[in-house]
Image (cartoon, grey):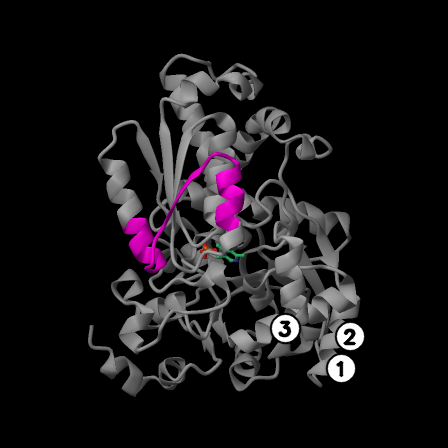
């Protein structure tokens, strides 16, 4: 792919190729009401996925006793982090107008990452489809009976390619139901994630190559076995829908905390982005719920900005970061993806406000600041979610604020850093991050 013409005509892409931190603002964002009906999915589908999750809750509660208190609903806290806000303002010598909150998907039950939304939804939906097809249950049954059907599910295989967290989510859920489970792990995956999966009886195949390659091999292996199902992060609409349900839940959480989102009180959300499925699903849901009052930004490592290059060139999955001479290597293992999803960039074309990149060196600093100020531990990938509030005074952001008539509203903004993972990181690995 010859990308010279893109780099020569676009200063931001030049900076991206030079591994500089940027904010790429999406000039194709549209008023939500004008594009709302142009998608093949919408609020009805999100509500349908949400209802399915309610139906699966009785089963989840039995398989994972830690979800007993929430009645089998997998959700995370939305927490104000005033101390972190103060610390960031002092440390970086900046002013953060508005309120700063953390959406703690880092602490979602079962998988300890945002992947607990999409991954668990997709596995349960697959299990439901199989059980209905084979006459094991009817739609009117209480699905908790599926907790004891290991002898049924073990005839089938579930496979997935992963940089770590998707593997954890799919692997743990599939193995608990009884599926034979194979996770194809890219070179970026942390050792402890592989060990944890093996402890659940999951077969982990390790590759010396990147994520796209692990997915490709996994997909092909799965194709050769008619009883195998491949969770396809590059194309899956089920994963996307599972993620999108978070928007309905967030709306309730904001209401419960008396936090307004309307014309006068905008919502800014910052989502760490790998292949795009998780942040894309969440952002799609948020736009359905809050329309033009929510401003969604993705954040990627300077060494793996696949969504940014895909959207800025409009080449989407036809271009990868390596085409820009970028190596795709980052400590943010959950974001170590060189080529974006086929679906997500296209869905985001008229919805996303922009994409930031963040330097790896800042991730560890943020990790430590959050831990010392709030006693909350999140993994390096999740720390990317703070880039937006740290660079509110950049030239690009100032322009965005002006163009969207937000100048007078900035002190009423609610900023949400979407923390995407961290709870399962073992103590010894945690201590190393905190020492660095
Ligand atoms: C997977 C992941 C993301 C991004 O999700 P994608 O669907 O790959 O874009 C962000 N943070 C963490 C911790 C993740 O595991």
Mark yes or no: residue 43 visible: no
Is 16 inside the magenta-drawn segment? Answer: no
Looking at the rendered structure, the secondary structure element under dot 3 is loop
Q: Which residue range is magenta in the image?
A: 193-216
Viewer-proximal residue among 274 and 161: 161
Residue carrying label 1: 90
Residue 436 is tagged as 3
Q: Is residue 228 left or right of residue 64?
A: left
Q: What separation in Å lies between label 3 and label 2 (alpha carbons)?
A: 23 Å
x 76%, y 68%: residue: 372
The dot on residue 86 is 2
Question: Is residue 363 something that shows in the picture?
Answer: yes
Q: Is residue 200 magenta?
A: yes
Disc 3 or 2, which lies upstream in sequence?
2
Q: Nearer the viewer, mark 1 or mark 3?
A: 3
* Crowd band around label 3 with a 10 angstrom C-alpha radius: few (<14), some (14–19), many (20+): few
Secondary structure under the numbered disc 2 in the rendered image: helix
**Disc 1 crowd, CA 10 A, few/some/many (<14, 14-19, 20+):** few
């Amino acid at each position: 792919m010859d990308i010279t013409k893109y780099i020569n005509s676009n200063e931001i892409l030049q900076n991206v190729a030079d591994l500089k931190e940027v904010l790429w603002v999406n000039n194709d964002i549209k008023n939500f009401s004008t594009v709302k009906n142009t998608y093949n999915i919408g609020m009805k589908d999100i509500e349908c996925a949400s209802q399915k999750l309610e139906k699966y809750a009785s089963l989840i509660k039995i398989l994972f006793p830690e979800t007993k208190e929430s009645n089998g609903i997998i959700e995370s806290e939305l927490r104000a982090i005033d101390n972190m806000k103060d610390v960031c303002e002092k440390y970086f010598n900046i002013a953060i107008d508005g309120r700063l909150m953390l959406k703690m998907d880092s602490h979602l039950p079962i998988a300890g990452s945002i992947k607990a939304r999409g991954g668990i939804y997709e596995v349960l939906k697959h299990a439901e489809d199989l059980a209905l097809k084979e006459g094991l249950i009817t739609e009117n049954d209480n699905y908790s009976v599926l907790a004891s059907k290991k002898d049924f599910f073990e005839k089938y295989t579930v496979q997935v390619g992963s940089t770590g967290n998707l593997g954890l989510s799919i692997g743990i859920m599939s193995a608990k139901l009884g599926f034979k489970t194979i996770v194809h792990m890219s070179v970026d995956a942390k050792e402890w994630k592989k060990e944890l999966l093996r402890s659940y009886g999951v077969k982990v195949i390790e590759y010396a190559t990147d994520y796209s390659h692990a997915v490709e091999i996994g997909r092909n292996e799965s194709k050769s076995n008619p009883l195998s199902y491949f969770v396809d992060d590059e194309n899956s609409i089920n994963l996307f829908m599972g993620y999108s349900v978070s928007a309905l839940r967030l709306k309730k959480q904001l209401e419960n905390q008396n936090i307004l989102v309307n014309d006068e009180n905008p919502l800014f959300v910052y989502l760490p982005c790998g292949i795009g499925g998780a942040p894309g699903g969440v952002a799609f849901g948020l736009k359905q719920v809050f329309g033009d009052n929510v401003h969604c930004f993705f954040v990627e490592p300077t060494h793996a900005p696949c969504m940014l290059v895909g959207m800025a060139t409009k080449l989407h999955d036809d271009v990868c970061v390596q085409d820009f001479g970028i190596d795709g290597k980052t400590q943010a293992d959950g974001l170590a993806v060189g080529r974006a999803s086929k679906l997500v960039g296209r869905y985001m074309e008229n919805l996303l406000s922009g994409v930031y990149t963040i330097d790896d060196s800042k991730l560890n600093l943020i990790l430590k600041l959050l831990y010392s100020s709030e006693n909350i531990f999140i993994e390096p990938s999740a720390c990317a979610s703070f880039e937006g509030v740290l660079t509110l005074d950049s030239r690009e952001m100032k322009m965005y604020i002006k163009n969207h008539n937000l100048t007078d509203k900035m002190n009423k903004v609610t900023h949400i850093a979407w923390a995407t993972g961290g709870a399962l990181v073992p103590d010894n690995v945690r201590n190393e991050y905190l020492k660095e």
